[in-house]
Amino acid sequence: MNRRTIVAAAIGLLGASMSAASLAQSISVKGSDTMLPLGQGWAAAYMKAKPGRVVTVTGGGSTTGIAGLINGICDIAQASRIMKGSELARAKARGFVPFETPVARDGLAVVVHPSNPLNKITMAQLKAIFSGQAATWKALGGPDQAIVTVGRDSSSGTYGFFQDTVLGIGRPYRPDMQTSPSSNLIGQVVSQDTGAIGYIGIGYAKKFGSKVKVLTVDKGDGKAVEPTEENVRSGKYPLSRYLFFYTRGKPGGAVKDFIDWVRSAEGQAIVPDVGYYKVN
C-alpha cells in the first residue's frame, strides 16, 4: 500500500468517525402536543448553546410519543401524563424499563367563550358537563344555551389526564364531545363558539389571552382556585400536573446532556416564556 493510499484510507476512517460522532449527537423527541412549544423552545436554545448538537421535536400526542419510544423511533417521549401499566409492560417486553424525568409543571385550564357569564366551575359540574349529564348552561346558572364540549383526541395525554381526574378512571366522555388533534384548535373553537367549553394547557390559555375566559375551579370545598404558578405548585389547583420526559432506561450520552440542560437554570428559564411553570 503506497503513501497516497494510506492517506486516503486515513481520511476515509476519519470521515466515518466524524459521521458516527455526528449521528451520536442527534436527539429525537416526540409526543405531547401540550409540550410541543416547550420542546421546540428547548431544542432551539440547546442547539444554540451546544453547536454540533441536533434536536428534532415532533408532536402527535403523549400516547404516540410513548409508542415511539417503545418501538425505538425516538430517544425521548414527551408526555403530559404518567405512563400506563400496559405501556410499561410493553416496554419491559422490549427489554427496557422507561425512566421518568419531570421537566415542567402545568395547570390544565378550563376555558369558555369570553361572553359566558360564568367565572368559576366545580369539579362536580365539570364531570356533569363532560359526561353528558348537563346539556345546557342554564343548569349551571348561565343562559338557556346548549353546551358544546371540546376536548383532545384519545392519543393525547391531556385527554387521559382530564378523563381520569374529572370523570374518574375508565369512565367515558360524552359521545358528542368534539375531539381535536391539538390544543391550539380547542382554543380556536372556544374563542369562536359562545356555547363552548374546553380544556388546554396553561401555556395555550395564556397564548389566547382575552379570546377565551379561564374559569377558576372549585374541587368541592367552596374555594374556587386559579391555575397560577403558586396554586399549581401547592396542589391547591385541582388540575395541576407535571410534564415528563421518558427515555429507554436511565439516560446517558447526548440524551442525558440534553435532559440535564433542560432541568438546569438555563433550560428552565425557557419554561415561563412558553407559559408553563418551572419544575422546581
Image (cartoon, rainbow, N blue to C red):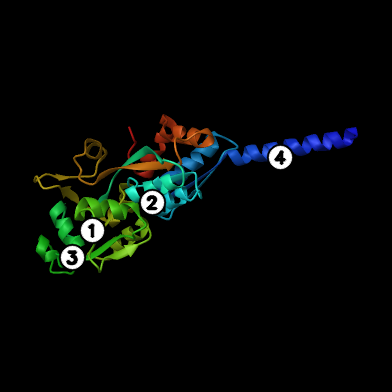
Residue position for label 3: 132
Given this view, does label 1 or label 2 mark the residue nearer the observer?
A: 2
User: What's the mark number on residue 16?
Assistant: 4
Q: Position of residue 87 (x, y in %)?
A: 37, 49
Q: Position of residue 256 (x, y in %)?
A: 48, 34
Residue position for label 2: 62
Q: How many marks?
A: 4
Between the residue at mark 3 and the residue at mark 4, the CA separation in whole angstroms equals 60 Å
Residue displayed at 57% across by 38% down: 53
Could you tell me if the residues under marks 4 and 2 are in contact, i.e. CB atoms within 8 Å?
A: no
- In this orientation, does residue 110 appear? no
Between the residue at mark 1 and the residue at mark 2, the CA separation in whole angstroms equals 29 Å
Q: For the residue labelled by badge 3, is the local secondary structure a helix, a strand or a loop?
A: loop
Q: For the residue labelled by badge 2, is the local secondary structure a helix, a strand or a loop?
A: helix
Image-quadrant location for residue 174: bottom left
Q: Amino acid at mark 4?
A: Ala
Residue displayed at 18% across by 40% down: 236
Q: Position of residue 37 (x, y in %)?
A: 42, 48
Residue position for label 1: 114
Q: Amino acid at mark 2?
A: Ser
Q: Amino acid at mark 1?
A: Pro
Between the residue at mark 3 and the residue at mark 2, the CA separation in whole angstroms equals 26 Å
Check the image and report above or below for 124 versus 19: below
Which of marks 3 and 1 precedes in the sequence?
Answer: 1
Q: The C terminus is located in which quarter?
A: top left
Residue displayed at 47% across by 35% down: 251
Which of marks 2 and 1 precedes in the sequence?
Answer: 2
Q: Position of residue 23 (x, y in %)?
A: 61, 41
